[in-house]
Amino acid sequence: MLPLIILPPLKIGAKKTLKNILHQITLVILMQDIEALKKEAGIKACEYVQNGMKVGLGTGSTVKYTIIELARRIIEEGLEITGVPTSLATKELAESLGISLIELDQTNGLDIVIDGADEFDPSFQLIKGGGAALLREKIVAQASNKMVVVADDRKQVTTLGQFPLPIEINLFCAGTTVKQIEKLLNCDVKIRKQDGKELKTDNGNLIADAFTGPKIADPVSIETDILKIAGVVQVGLFNNMCDVVIVAGKNGVEVLEKQ
Ligand code: 5RP
């Protein structure tokens, strides 16, 4: 069955060509397809969660489906878990769904974290931070025995960097920090904005996005070099952390386990 498509009203007299309208329809269908893939990957990841586990709850539009499915299992199947959110947005979502939460400091580490990613390469090195939550996400991932990433197949790349690399930086002399990152990476770096204002992270910092292009062949050394810059709080390269990627594409969901 064809999906129901609601288009914005066309202004009378506007030069809308048939080509424009078809383009809009294609975009809407594509977005619906991508949402379906995110949901498939998000739900599949819940198979890794068992009774009694302490679970890191990631941030983003894909892992949202994991969190919703976990809440369903809690209500309908009596699943007992405790969650640690990686952002204020995830905390709010989990609380609204009735998932019991705990502070990471009150644990001796987590069994698993499930999170999204902006890119993953063949070695499961990740770019994260598209949702500006990279610092908390990295703290939670480092405290977890296993990291499962949920993604659609647009995120699968040969070499990291097509997605601008998010770097959380301190407010103090942020312009200087940006220049130092530009010099190091030899690329444009822009402070991320939201609604015309500089975006502030949950930690009160800024996000600098580095437009490297798909050239991050050695993410481990790049992470080390970026972290040497004093104004850098954390970088969205998650190296040697991810154990499993659950990737949804046109041909279904694939579970990729690190060898
Ligand atoms: C937030 C993140 C997200 O996990 C990442 O941006 C992927 O998000 P989405 O599933 O919405 O594409 O790193 O900081």
Image (cartoon, grey):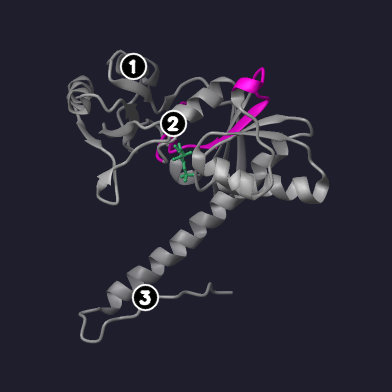
The quarter of the image holding the C terminus is: top right
- The answer to whether marks 1 and 2 mark residues whose Cβ atoms lie closer than 8 Å is no
Look at the numbered disc 1 and give the secondary structure of its residue: helix
Is 143 above or below relative to 37? Answer: above
Instruction: Name the N-terminal-most of marks 1 and 2.
Output: 2
Q: Residue, x 70% and y 33% (percent of image)?
A: 82
- The answer to whether marks 2 and 3 mark residues whose Cβ atoms lie closer than 8 Å is no
The quarter of the image holding the N terminus is: bottom right
Task: Say which residue label 2 marks.
Answer: 134
Relative to residue 14, is residue 109 drawn left or right?
right
Q: Position of residue 203 (x, y in %)?
A: 41, 31
Q: Name the mark on residue 227.
A: 1
Task: Say which residue label 3 marks.
Answer: 8
Instruction: Name the N-terminal-most of marks 1 and 3.
Output: 3
* Residue 107 on the magenta segment: yes
- Cα–Cα span, label 1 and label 2: 14 Å
- Cα–Cα span, label 2 and label 3: 35 Å
Q: Residues within 10 Å of mark 1 (few under 14, many from 20)?
A: some
Q: Position of residue 192 (x, y in %)?
A: 28, 40
Residues rendered magenta in the picture: 105-130
